[in-house]
């Protein structure tokens, strides 16, 4: 209705909010329970849907790790309750070896994709992009809704795969062929693998629909005055995340389609010269390459770790700056290093394949490019530290988790330098050193960033605060616990303890780690219990938490805090505010903070100067 | 509130689209980039496997039949298919242009021609697949010998059917989209909206599918 076309066939430039208005009608329409809570097109509700689904997945995925840590920590004990809940997968109270693989596979898949991709990006991109750039909703609220429902369908199929007779996929979260391509190769390679692939294909669609929306909302729908150099770093981070998703997930989809053909159509894309022990048969497949799959997988798989970590980098930057009452240090350097990380993300995938038969000459380039990532990462770390430096720190739960994030990112990042060297990788690959590295640098630290974001934006999401005491308990036990779990794994890895082994008892040289394994498992259980405390705090506070009484409880500058305490569909009542400054005017000209909506005063220190 | 913005205004300062496009077109471009990576992954996989093989069947030997004219006509039929698809791109351009001029009849005429072109292409593909199937070619079976006379692996047909099938699926989706556009045009949806931007977005998709065919054609039939 708003597009007018002139004589030359060029549509006129239109205010972006007008375009948006075509899609739905602001906050005037009546909402039923179904349109408000289930098939909602409000970005804030969709964000909450992603969040709650993500939390459920996180509990499931975390529980899996507790189950297999029981086995690793207490290989000689039996746990009859396991048989009660798992049936034939834990006969006699001990995990069946096949099921152990299924647990580790699903733990990885669930946490990497369903929690730290959909649960994290889905929540914060949906929630914060329109609120922080000043838009009434996403570019296409309908596609946004579809995105969630594709995720939901993927979740249902993935959950269903846990209950099939032959068990869920068990070939590792990477699903390398030939194991994943041959149904006869293992129980988990049967129907569980198909369900896994179908769920992941739906997941790719979810990611694509979401990312297209995030990108066009950020580029097209910023409010007046909100130039790209004024948006909060969260927005930049979510933009790069979305671009990575749009360009890397399709390659994974291609890889999966070829894998499905190998499984069911007798093709040999990934298969060649195979003798299958379980059926005592030589397979006719010829000419395929298992390494091809690894290339296709890791072309997504590596950007995927940045899809996980970049959003948290953005969240942490904003939470930290607001709670240090200081501008973020080096805004443009932050943007530049995120851009560098996004570019390098596509150029380093083969460092996951140093020992799979990759040409060592090719490996040398990947070593160089991999180590280059240390540069932007270090820039970001120094910027966070200098943001804290001489700040007027408020140790809110969000702030604590932000600081914890930086600590973990440093600890985990440093071991990346070891692993990025192809020669050292010959010794370290497939050991607990790798497990320790990626859990600290992208698993736990991404969780810390997510917790920082949740504690910080919970008041905006639900109009209530979370309980601080529980939050502090949650923080300290999780931080200490994360180090206690993963720090010792570095020693195990250096000693050569391989990953994916059910039982080390027949391996005399690793008996020295029995006590350590038991220790790690006990800490895992404690840390998991504390996460349940967080879940309790989350749902309890949603209904019974202390009410937010002021519009801007943290004294933050960005736009989301100019909306009503419980914003309706459409976010702002009346006009969308105009923006006059960047999002980091903290501690300027003797004032604690200046909101983005305040015009620049006549005698004010110029933008960017401090 | 639709207002023209003077050219000298800053494009990136917020309050308007920096590319002077509405979000749907922007999304279409990003979707096409994404889809390009899907096809890119397929074609690079094909190249990897082909160049790691000792030898490969000769396309001039494989694709030499023409319905009604028998065999011995290398690449004739696929040239016709390619020609049809490229012509359908031309009619799509004409439909978009008619849309700019708010010429409903022109849009309808050219959309119908584009749809016919798409269906013709799909029919040609169906004939070619059927013909090859009767020669014994399918996923997992390859009757064609390598160019050096040795027995070939099945990957020639595996990749051929997968990638042309995936492309055909895109053409099929494009035909469906164009049919929806046609129905919307006939129902005066765009007349009422005052613009034919949707046709333009469908056009972007259609041209992309054609462009992909140029690559598929090159690597499967020419090289």
Image (tube, coloured by chain):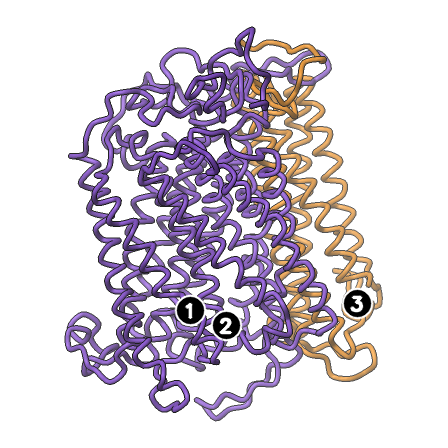
Q: Is residue B150 left or right of residue A346?
A: right
- Among the chains pictured, the one given orange colouring is B
Q: Position of residue A329 (x, y in %)?
A: 54, 34
Please say if A381 is above or below A511.
above
Are both tags, 2 and 3, on one chain? no
Q: Is residue A154 left or right of residue A548?
A: right
Kindly identify which residue carries mark 2: A263
Q: Residue at x 44, y 74 (%)?
A: A491
First in sequence, mark 1 or 2: give its number: 1
Q: Residues within 10 Å of mark 3 (few under 14, many from 20)?
A: some
Secondary structure at badge 3 equals helix
Q: Are marks 3 and 1 in contact (CB under 8 Å)?
A: no
Question: What colour do you see for chain A?
Answer: purple
Q: Are marks 2 and 3 in contact (CB under 8 Å)?
A: no
Viewer-side residue, A86 vs B63? A86
Viewer-side residue, A113 vs A308? A308
Q: Quadrant of residue B162?
A: bottom right
Kindly identify which residue carries mark 3: B59
Secondary structure at badge 1 equals helix
- Quadrant of image for the C terminus of chain A: top right
Viewer-side residue, B74 vs A277? A277
Q: Position of residue A396 (x, y in %)?
A: 32, 37
Q: Chain of mark 2?
A: A
Foreground: disc 3 or disc 1: 1
Kindly identify which residue carries mark 1: A193
Q: Quadrant of residue A605?
A: top right
């Amino acid at each position: 209705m708003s597009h007018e076309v002139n004589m030359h066939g060029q549509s006129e430039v239109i205010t972006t909010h007008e375009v948006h208005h075509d899609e739905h009608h602001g906050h005037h329409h009546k909402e039923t329970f179904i349109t408000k809570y289930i098939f909602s097109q409000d970005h804030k509700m969709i964000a909450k849907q992603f969040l709650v689904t993500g939390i459920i997945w996180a509990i499931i995925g975390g529980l899996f790790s507790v189950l297999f840590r029981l086995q690793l920590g207490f290989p000689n004990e039996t746990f009859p309750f396991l048989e009660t809940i798992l049936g034939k997968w834990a006969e006699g109270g001990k995990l069946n070896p096949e099921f152990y693989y299924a647990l580790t596979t699903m733990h990885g898949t669930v946490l990497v994709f369903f929690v730290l991709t959909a649960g994290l990006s889905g929540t914060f991109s949906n929630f914060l992009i329109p609120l922080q750039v000043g838009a009434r909703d996403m570019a296409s609220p309908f596609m946004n809704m579809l995105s969630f429902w594709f995720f939901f369908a993927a979740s249902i199929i993935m959950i269903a795969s846990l209950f099939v007779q032959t068990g869920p996929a068990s070939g590792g979260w990477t699903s390398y062929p030939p194991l994943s391509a041959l149904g006869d190769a293992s129980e988990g390679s049967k129907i569980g693998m198909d369900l896994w692939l179908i769920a992941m294909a739906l997941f790719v669609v979810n990611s694509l629909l979401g990312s297209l929306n995030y990108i066009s909302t950020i580029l097209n729908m910023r409010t007046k005055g909100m130039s790209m150099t004024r948006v909060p770093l969260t927005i930049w981070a979510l933009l790069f995340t979305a671009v990575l998703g749009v360009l890397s997930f399709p390659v994974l989809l291609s890889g999966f389609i070829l894998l499905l053909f190998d499984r069911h159509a007798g093709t040999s894309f990934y298969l060649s010269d195979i003798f299958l022990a379980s059926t005592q048969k030589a397979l006719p497949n010829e000419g395929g390459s298992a390494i091809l799959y690894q290339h296709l997988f890791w072309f997504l798989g590596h950007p995927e770790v940045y899809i996980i970590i970049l959003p948290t980098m953005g969240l942490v930057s904003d939470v930290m700056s607001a709670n240090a009452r200081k501008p973020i240090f080096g805004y443009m350097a932050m943007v530049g290093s995120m851009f560098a990380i996004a570019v390098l993300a596509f150029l380093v995938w083969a460092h996951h394949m140093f020992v799979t038969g990759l040409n060592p000459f090719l490996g040398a380039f990947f070593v160089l490019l991999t180590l280059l990532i240390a540069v932007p990462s270090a820039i970001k770390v120094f910027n966070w530290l200098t943001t804290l430096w001489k700040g007027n720190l408020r140790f809110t739960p969000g702030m604590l988790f932000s600081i914890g994030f930086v600590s973990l990112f440093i600890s985990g990042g440093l071991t990346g330098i070891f692993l990025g060297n192809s020669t050292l990788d010959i010794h370290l690959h497939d050991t607990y050193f790798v497990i320790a590295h990626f859990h600290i640098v992208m698993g736990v630290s991404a969780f810390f960033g997510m917790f920082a974001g949740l504690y910080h934006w919970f008041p905006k999401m639900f109009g209530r605060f979370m309980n601080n005491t529980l939050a502090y308990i949650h923080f300290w036990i999780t931080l200490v616990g994360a180090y206690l779990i993963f720090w010792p794994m570095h020693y195990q890895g250096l000693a050569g303890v391989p990953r994916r082994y059910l039982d080390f008892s027949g391996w005399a040289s690793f008996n020295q780690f029995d006590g350590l394994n038991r220790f790690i498992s006990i800490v895992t259980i404690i840390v998991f219990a504390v996460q349940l405390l967080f879940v309790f705090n989350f749902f309890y506070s949603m209904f019974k938490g202390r009410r937010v009484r002021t519009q801007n409880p943290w004294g933050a500058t960005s736009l989301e805090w100019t909306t009503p305490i419980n914003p309706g569909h459409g976010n702002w009542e009346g006009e969308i505010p105009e923006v006059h400054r960047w999002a980091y005017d903290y501690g300027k000209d003797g004032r604690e903070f200046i909101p983005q909506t305040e015009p620049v005063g006549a005698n004010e220190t110029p933008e960017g100067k401090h | 509130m639709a207002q023209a913005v003077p050219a000298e205004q800053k494009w990136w300062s917020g309050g308007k689209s920096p590319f002077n496009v509405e979000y749907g077109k922007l999304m279409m471009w990003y979707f096409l980039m994404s889809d390009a990576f899907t096809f890119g992954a397929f074609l690079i996989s094909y190249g990897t496997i082909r160049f790691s093989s000792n030898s490969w069947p000769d396309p001039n030997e494989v694709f030499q039949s023409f319905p009604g004219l028998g065999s011995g006509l290398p690449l004739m039929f696929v040239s016709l298919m390619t020609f049809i698809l490229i012509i359908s791109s031309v009619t799509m351009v004409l439909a978009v242009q008619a849309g700019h001029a708010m010429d409903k009849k022109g849009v309808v005429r050219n959309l119908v021609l584009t749809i016919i072109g798409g269906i013709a292409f799909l029919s040609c593909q169906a004939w070619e697949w059927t013909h090859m199937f009767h020669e014994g070619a399918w996923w997992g079976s390859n009757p064609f010998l390598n160019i050096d006379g040795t027995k070939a692996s099945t990957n020639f047909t595996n990749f051929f059917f997968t990638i042309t099938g995936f492309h055909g699926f895109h053409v099929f989706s494009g035909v469906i989209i164009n049919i929806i556009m046609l129905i919307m045009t006939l129902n005066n949806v765009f007349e009422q909206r005052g613009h034919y931007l949707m046709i333009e977005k469908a056009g972007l998709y259609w041209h992309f599918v054609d462009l992909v065919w140029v690559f598929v054609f090159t690597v499967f039939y020419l090289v």
